[in-house]
Image: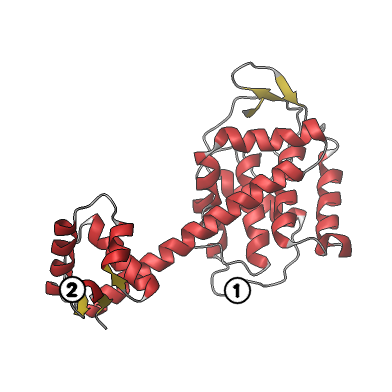
Amino acid sequence: TLVPSRGTVPERNSRVQLEKGSSADEGTVPTGTHIPLTPSILAEVHRLTVEHILPQDEAGQYRSVKVIIRNTQSHEITFRPPGPFEVPGLIEELFKWLASPEGQEVHPLLRAGILHYELVRIHPFTDGNGRTARAMALLLLFLEGYEVKKFFALEEYYDAHPEEYYSALQSVTISHELTTWLEYFTLGISIEFNRVKSLVHKLSLDLHLKSTIGGRQITLSQRQIKLVEYIERHGEIGMGNVRELLSDVSDDTILRDLRDLVTKNLLIKKGSTKGTKYYLKK
C-alpha cells in the first residue's frame, strides 16, 4: 500500500467532495463543456477535498517538504516523489500536455487515467493526493461529456480493491510503462458504468411497477423480483425460461410465485399448459 512518510489524516469520500465542488457550478456548467483543466483548478479541487481536515495554509498549496512512499506492511520505501521545488514545473508540464494537440488526441478515458497516475506520482500536496487525483480524473471525464456526477462513484471501486489499486500504480514504477495501470483504471470505469446502468434499469423498473399498481405498496420476494426483471428485459417469460432462471426452485414454488404476481396485478398470463407466457401488465 502507498502511504506518505508523514502521518496521514482521514480523507473524506471523494464523491461527497465532487458534489460539493460542483454544487456552485450546478446548472451553469453542463456535461461536455470544454473548459481546460489548469493548475488553479487542481488547487481548488484539493482545497475542497481537504477542507476542515488539513490546516488552512496547506489546503490547495503545493507541499514544501519531501515525502516518501512506504509499504504499510514491510515499511519498505517503494517510491520517492519529486522534491518540492520540482512540483510546480511538473504540474505546469502535465496540464500543458493535457491541453496540447498531442494530449487531446488521446481518448478521454486514457487521458483521465494518465492524469490520475501523474498526480499520484508527482504528489503535489502534503496529503489528499489520491482523493484529489481521483476527483480530477472524474472532472476530466465530466468535461468530456461523461455524466459522472450523481450516481457515479469510482471511489467505491478502488475502496473495494485497495491492494489491486496500489499494485497497479506501483506497476508503473517497476515496468516504466502505464499499460497495467490504464487497464486497471479503465476496468474500474467500465465496472462503475455497468453498476450505474443496472441502477438506472432498477429505477426504471420501479417506476414502471409503481405506475402499474397505481402507487400501492407491495412486497416481492427475491425470486419474484428476478422474474419481473427478466420479463422487463425480454418482454415475456415462459416456463422453460423460468426453470433456467430459477434452476434450484421447484415447479410448485415457481407457479405459486407467478400466480401471486398475476393476483397483484403485475403480470398477465396468456396461453395454457406448456405454451403459457407471462407479460408485464401495462
Left or right: residue 194 compared with residue 186: left
Q: Position of residue 13 (x, y in %)?
A: 50, 46
Front: mark 1 or 2 = 2
Which residue sits at x=35%, y=76%?
A: 235
Q: Pick whichever, 25 or 203, lies toward us.
A: 203
Label 1–label 2 contact, CB within 8 A: no
Q: Position of residue 91 (x, y in %)?
A: 81, 47
The residue wearing badge 2 is: 273
Mark 2 lies on a secondary structure that is helix
Which residue sits at x=60%, y=25%?
A: 7
Q: CA distance from mark 1 to mark 2?
A: 54 Å
The residue wearing badge 1 is: 30
Left or right: residue 42 compared with residue 208: right
Using the rendered image of the protein, determine whether residue 5 is visible from the camera's viewpoint.
no
**What amino acid is at disc 1?**
Pro
User: Within the image, what quadrant is residue 72 found in?
Assistant: top right
Which residue sits at x=83%, y=36%?
A: 176
Q: Pick whichever, 91 or 180, lies toward us.
A: 180
Using the rendered image of the protein, determine whether residue 244 is visible from the camera's viewpoint.
yes
Which residue sits at x=18%, y=67%?
A: 258
* Circle number at residue 82: none
The number of numbered discs placed on residues in the rendered structure image is: 2
Q: Position of residue 233 (x, y in %)?
A: 39, 71
**What amino acid is at disc 2?**
Thr
The 10 Å Cα crowd at callout 1, few under 14, some 14 to 19, many 20 or more, is few
Of callouts 1 and 2, which one flags the residue occurring earlier in the amino acid sequence?
1
Q: Pick whichever, 143 or 275, lies toward us.
A: 275
The 10 Å Cα crowd at callout 2, few under 14, some 14 to 19, many 20 or more, is few
